[in-house]
Amino acid sequence: MTAEAGLPDTLRDLPVWTPNPVELADLELVLAGVYRPLTGFLGSFDTATVTAGGRLADGTPWPVPVTLTVPKEMTGHERVVLQDPEGVPLAVLAVAEAWQDPVTQAWRLAGPLEALRSPAHGPFHSLRRRPDELAPAGGPVLAVATRDVLHRKQLGQLRQVAERLGAKVLVLPLLGGEHDDSLVRALLGVRKELPDGTRIVPVPLPARDDQEHGDQERDDQERDVRLRAHVAAAYGATHLLAEAELEGTPIPLVVPEPWAYDADVEVWRPVARIEPDHVQAELTAERLAELLDAGEPVPDWFTPPAVAAELALARPPKRSRGITVFFTGLSGSGKSTVARGLSDALVERGGRTVTLLDGDVVRRMLSAGLTFSRADRDLNIRRIGFVAAEITRHGGTAVCAPIAPYAATRAEVRRMVSAVGDFILVHVATPLEECERRDRKGLYAKARAGQIPEFTGISDPYEVPDDADLTLDTSRMTPDEAVGEVLALLVDGGWVRPE
């Protein structure tokens, strides 16, 4: 693919590539000067030294690998146009190195970036600023770089630390999740409870998983804190509020003293000022999730109403939350029959909009023209997953019934859907012998005769799920009984009301 019209003539024939969300965020922060001294994506040597010791090859401290993954066929070019998901060209990468990651075997490009235009995607773009667009505070600045809302405890701690430092406050909502809008609205909603002059500047910084580089979870957390400190420093912060101390960060980390809710006077304040028998237990993350799942109000003593309202929007009650029920199994296992029965049963009960994405129907409509090669079968499942995720995002119920033989592709669909709602995997584990005996379409007979290559269960593997929420064997039960088991799971889980 080459760059579209609208670019200078010198760029129109260049290949184009769309980075993934983390890479797009890295690109934006490099171009904005937030990642200084970085001027582009890292090469193999810098990546190795950052991964091993948190420093670039020249010794400069830097916490995380900033790399760009591309298909192998992109590695033969000297310059590449990088675009956003809507096809808007953002920058030109001058390729200094094409290299293969020794751990993942992924191909990567490294080199400096030349900006073409500023990114203009994402919610609350009007609030986003480059560091050079912020006027100097003229004194200490305490930053809070967060992917989570601020409850009453955190707000009190923030005010106390800012007062002690005599600092202005800079809140940096870190964007990159499915509920960025709720996060920013929740922080704007508590602005009156923040110190005067507080600035709120959203920053694109998705959580990254560097497990592919051999990191442990604790190392990942430390690298994330160091990266937040780099970002905060770039925006003029002199201190970063943190949960634990860590040496060697660009700006000092400030850990607030423990706070708790004093049930006697009904306020949050430092634990040292509260009688031990007056300390009220804080809501755990698990208990908060239970309240939201059940549609119960989050108590005012725990969080301001504006935050509670945004939490309820981001995590609706289970009975009104979008959900995908994804059936997987061999051809002839009965998954389509059970999926249709479940769809009918949900419609009969009411309260949910239901869309059935059956394998054969999808093949004729959504995936017409695809073959049965592994690549095309994976693409078919990804298309189903994309549609199911959109249905789920808007509060609907998607019932899917493809074969979906490969664990990695099923996991990809689970991730897509789980980012916006709930995902239930049902393995219809009817034995191959029974599926072959049924063989209404004569497919198994053709596969045995070699007329159908790469046929699941015969000449191509079916990877049995180890993460199924429910397993059914339709050779041991009627279709109605199978539907009943799925319904029972949905009722017990709180997604469907009892009959």
Image: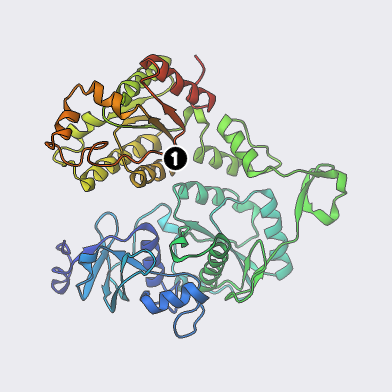
Query: Going 70% across and 57% down the picture, which residue do you hit?
Result: 157
Residue 434 shown left or right of residue 146 in the figure: left
Question: Which one is in front, 404 or 203?
Answer: 404
Query: Going 51% across and 22% down the picture, which residue do you hit?
Result: 491
Q: Is residue 204 visible?
A: no
Q: Position of residue 495 (x, y in %)?
A: 49, 27
Q: Position of residue 284 (x, y in %)?
A: 67, 43
Residue 399 shown left or right of residue 180 in the figure: left
Q: Position of residue 24 (x, y in %)?
A: 36, 62
Query: Going 54% across and 24% down the picture, which residue do you hit?
Result: 492
In the displayed structure, 376 sits above or below 448; it is: below
Q: Position of residue 35 (x, y in %)?
A: 45, 73
- For the residue marked with disc 1, what is the amino acid? Asp
Mark 1 element type: loop
Name the residue carrying label 1. Answer: 466
In the displayed structure, 19 sits above or below 236; it is: above
Residue 2 shown left or right of residue 129 in the figure: left
Q: Quadrant of residue 382?
A: top left
